C-alpha cells in the first residue's frame, strides 16, 4: 500500500482480514493522512477533518471487517450540531433535536418547518438510493450504471438541477438557504454547480447528526491501524515510495529508501496525480498532465491552529462564519481564483467538548478558510488573513482573542503539497460536479494489471466515509482479479 490515509488503512484491514500479507508505507509519521493530529504546548489539534458525519456508514465499515466500532472508540452527538454567525451580528444554533429544528425553520419563514420536513424526506430518498445503488460501484464499466434498477433510481436523484436551485425553489429566507447550501461545500464546488442529488448531504447533516469521536478524529485511523496490525499487516512510517517500477504491463517493484521491494499487487492511496505523474513511468500513465489540468479541483485551505489562554464563551464546538456572501467567496475560489476579498470561514473548538485537548481554562481553535488551489502562499498573506479573521471573530464573540493567543501555527497550499504530495495543494481532492462523478472520476484501476488506486481523487469522492468506501472498493477489486 502506498499511503496510510483512511482509504489505504481500510484497504489494508480488508486485505489483511482475508489473509493477505500487507505492507503499508507512508511518508509521514502516523496513520490517518489528512486526518493527522499534532500536539504542542499542551494543545492537541486535529489537522484535517473535524466533522464526524454519517456515523451509520462508518459503523457499517467496521461491521464489514467483522469488528465493532464501539470496541475502539465512542462517539457523542453534538448539540448544538453547530453554530452559524450572520452578518446582522446574530447567530443561530442548529439543534440536534428534530422538533427544535422544525421550530427553527418555522421561525425563519412561514411554513418553514413543513418545507424542511418535505426537503429532508426527499433528501433521505436520495441518501438511501446513493448508499444502496451507487456509492460502492467501482466506476470501471458503463454497465454498472445501465442496470434498470439503477437507471430507475437515478431519475429520482435530480442530477440536472443544482442544489442551489432546489433550495431556492423551496425556501425564501436567506438564513434557511445558507444553512441548506452549507453541506455541499464539503463536495468542493458551489451549491449552484453541484447536482441536487447531493442534498443527501442535508439528510446526513440535519437528520443523522454531527458527532465527535472520543480521542479526536484520528481515533478512526488508530482503530483501523490496530485492526490491520492485529491481522498481520505491517506499517513503515517516515517511508516515501519514490518510484513504481514496471515490466511487461505489471508493477514489478516499489523503490523505497533506495531499494526495490517486490509485491504481487499494489494499492496506491496517496494523491492519484502524484502516483501517476511522479511515481509511474510515462508509458503506463492512464492520464496526462493536460487531463489533470482540466480537472476541477476542490479548494485548498488556509488553516490556523491556535491555542488561547482564555475561554471564548460565544463559540460552540463547530462554528460557521457566514457573515459574508457565500457566492462572492465561491467566485474567488472557482471562477476568478484569488485570495478572497471577504472570506467565509469555519472555527472548530474541540476544547468545548473534549477536556484533553487544551490546558485548563484554555481553548484550542482550528480556523479554516477555503481557498482556490495554486495561489501564491506567503507568510505575509497568512498574517493578513489571520488578522482579518481575528477581527471578525472578536466582533462576533464580543471578546478579545488576539492578545490571549499563546500558540499559533498555520498550514496552507505549500504545506498540502509537501505534507501530502497534494496536486495543486488541494485539500479535498476533486470537485464532485456531474462531469466528475462515478465513472467519470479517475479510475481505480491502472493500466498496469496489478496496480489499483483508492482515496479521495477516485470513486466515490472526498470525505471520511467516501475515503473508507474507496479503500473497500479497491481491495475488493484486487481480490476479484486475484
Ligand atoms: C483541512 C481538511 C478538512 C477536512 N474536513 C473534513 C471533515 O470535516 N469531514 C470529512 O468527512 N472529511 C473531511 N476532509 C476530507 C477527508 O479528510 C479526506 O477526504 C480523507 O481523509 C482523504 O483520505 P485519503 O486516504 O484519500 O488520502 P490522504 O489522507 O491524503 O492519505 C494519503 C497518504 O499518502 C501519503 N503519501 C503521499 N505520497 C506518498 C509517497 N510517495 N509515499 C508514501 N506515502 C505517501 C500521505 O502522506 C498521506 O498520509 C477534510 C480534509 C481536509 C484536508
Image: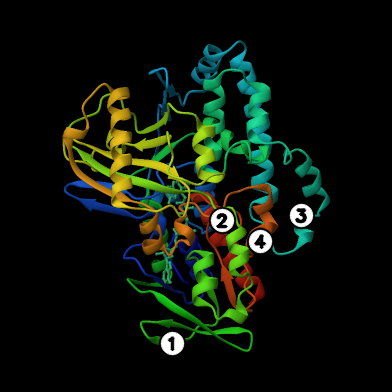
Q: Disc 4 marks which residue?
A: 138
The C terminus sits in image quarter:
bottom right
Q: Quadrant of residue 221?
A: bottom left
Q: Quadrant of residue 231?
A: bottom left
**Ligand number 1: quarter of image:** bottom left
- State the separation of the CA atoms marked 2 and 1: 30 Å
Which label is found at residue 469?
A: 2
Which label is found at residue 129?
A: none
Q: Disc 3 marks which residue?
A: 145
Mark 1 neighbour density, 10 Å: few (under 14) some (14–19) many (20 or more)? some
Residue 402 in the image: state x and y as whole percent: 21, 34
Q: Earlier in the sequence, mark 4 or mark 2?
A: 4
Q: Which residue is found at the position 50% from the left and 47% from the top? A: 337
Q: Evaluate if marks 1 and 4 touch, with contact meaning CB atoms under 8 Å apart.
A: no
Mark 4 neighbour density, 10 Å: few (under 14) some (14–19) many (20 or more)? many
Q: Earlier in the sequence, mark 3 or mark 2?
A: 3
Q: Evaluate if marks 4 and 3 touch, with contact meaning CB atoms under 8 Å apart.
A: no
Name the element at disc 1: strand
Rendered view: 402 above or below 223: above
Q: Which residue is found at the position 50% from the left and 60% from the top? A: 7
Amino acid at each position: 500500500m502506498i499511503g496510510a490515509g483512511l482509504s489505504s488503512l481500510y484497504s489494508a484491514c480488508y486485505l489483511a482480514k482475508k489473509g493477505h500479507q500487507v505492507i503499508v508505507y507512508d511518508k509521514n509519521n502516523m496513520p490517518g493522512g489528512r486526518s493527522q493530529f499534532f500536539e504542542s504546548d499542551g494543545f492537541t489539534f486535529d489537522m484535517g477533518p473535524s466533522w464526524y458525519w454519517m456515523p451509520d456508514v462508518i459503523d457499517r465499515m467496521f461491521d464489514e471487517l467483522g469488528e465493532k466500532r464501539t470496541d475502539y472508540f465512542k462517539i457523542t452527538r453534538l448539540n448544538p450540531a453547530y453554530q452559524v454567525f450572520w452578518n446582522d451580528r446574530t447567530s443561530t444554533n442548529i439543534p440536534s433535536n428534530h422538533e427544535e429544528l422544525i421550530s427553527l425553520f418555522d421561525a425563519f419563514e412561514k411554513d418553514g418547518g413543513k418545507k424542511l420536513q418535505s426537503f429532508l424526506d426527499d433528501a433521505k430518498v436520495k441518501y438511501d438510493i446513493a448508499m444502496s445503488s451507487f456509492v460502492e460501484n467501482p466506476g470501471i464499466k458503463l454497465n454498472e450504471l445501465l442496470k434498470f434498477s439503477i437507471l430507475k433510481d437515478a431519475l429520482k436523484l435530480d442530477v440536472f438541477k443544482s442544489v442551489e436551485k432546489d433550495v431556492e425553489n423551496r425556501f425564501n429566507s436567506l438564513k434557511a438557504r445558507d444553512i441548506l447550501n452549507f453541506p455541499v461545500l464539503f463536495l468542493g464546488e458551489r451549491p449552484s454547480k453541484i447536482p441536487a442529488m447531493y442534498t443527501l448531504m442535508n439528510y446526513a447533516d440535519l437528520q443523522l447528526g454531527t458527532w465527535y469521536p472520543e480521542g479526536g478524529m484520528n481515533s478512526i485511523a488508530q482503530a483501523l491501524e490496530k485492526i490491520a496490525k492485529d491481522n498481520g499487516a505491517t506499517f513503515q512510517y517516515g517511508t516515501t515510495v519514490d518510484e513504481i517500477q514496471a515490466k511487461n504491463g505489471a508493477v514489478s517493484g516499489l523503490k523505497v529508501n533506495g531499494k526495490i521491494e517486490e509485491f504481487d499487487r499494489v494499492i496506491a492511496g496517496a494523491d492519484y496525480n502524484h502516483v501517476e505523474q511522479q511515481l509511474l513511468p510515462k508509458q503506463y500513465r492512464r492520464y496526462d498532465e493536460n487531463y489533470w489540468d482540466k480537472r476541477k479541483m476542490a479548494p485548498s485551505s488556509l488553516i490556523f491552529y491556535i491555542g488561547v489562554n482564555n475561554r471564548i464563551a460565544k463559540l460552540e464546538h463547530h462554528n460557521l462564519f457566514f457573515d459574508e456572501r457565500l457566492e462572492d467567496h465561491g467566485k474567488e475560489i472557482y471562477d476568478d481564483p484569488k485570495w478572497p476579498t471577504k472570506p467565509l470561514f469555519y472555527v472548530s473548538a474541540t476544547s468545548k467538548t473534549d477536556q484533553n485537548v487544551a490546558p485548563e481554562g484554555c481553548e484550542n481553535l482550528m480556523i479554516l478558510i477555503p481557498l482556490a488551489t495554486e495561489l501564491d502562499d506567503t507568510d505575509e498573506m497568512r498574517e493578513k488573513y489571520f488578522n482579518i479573521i481575528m477581527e471578525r471573530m472578536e466582533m462576533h464573540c464580543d471578546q478579545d482573542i488576539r492578545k490571549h493567543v499563546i500558540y499559533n501555527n498555520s498550514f496552507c497550499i505549500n504545506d498540502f503539497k509537501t505534507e501530502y504530495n497534494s496536486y495543486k495543494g488541494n485539500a479535498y481532492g476533486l470537485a464532485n460536479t456531474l462531469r466528475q462523478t462515478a465513472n467519470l472520476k479517475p479510475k481505480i484501476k491502472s493500466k498496469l494489471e496489478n496496480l489499483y488506486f483508492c482515496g479521495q481523487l477516485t470513486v466515490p469522492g472526498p470525505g471520511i466515509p467516501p475515503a473508507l468506501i474507496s479503500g473497500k472498493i479497491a481491495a475488493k477489486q484486487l481480490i476479484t482479479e486475484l
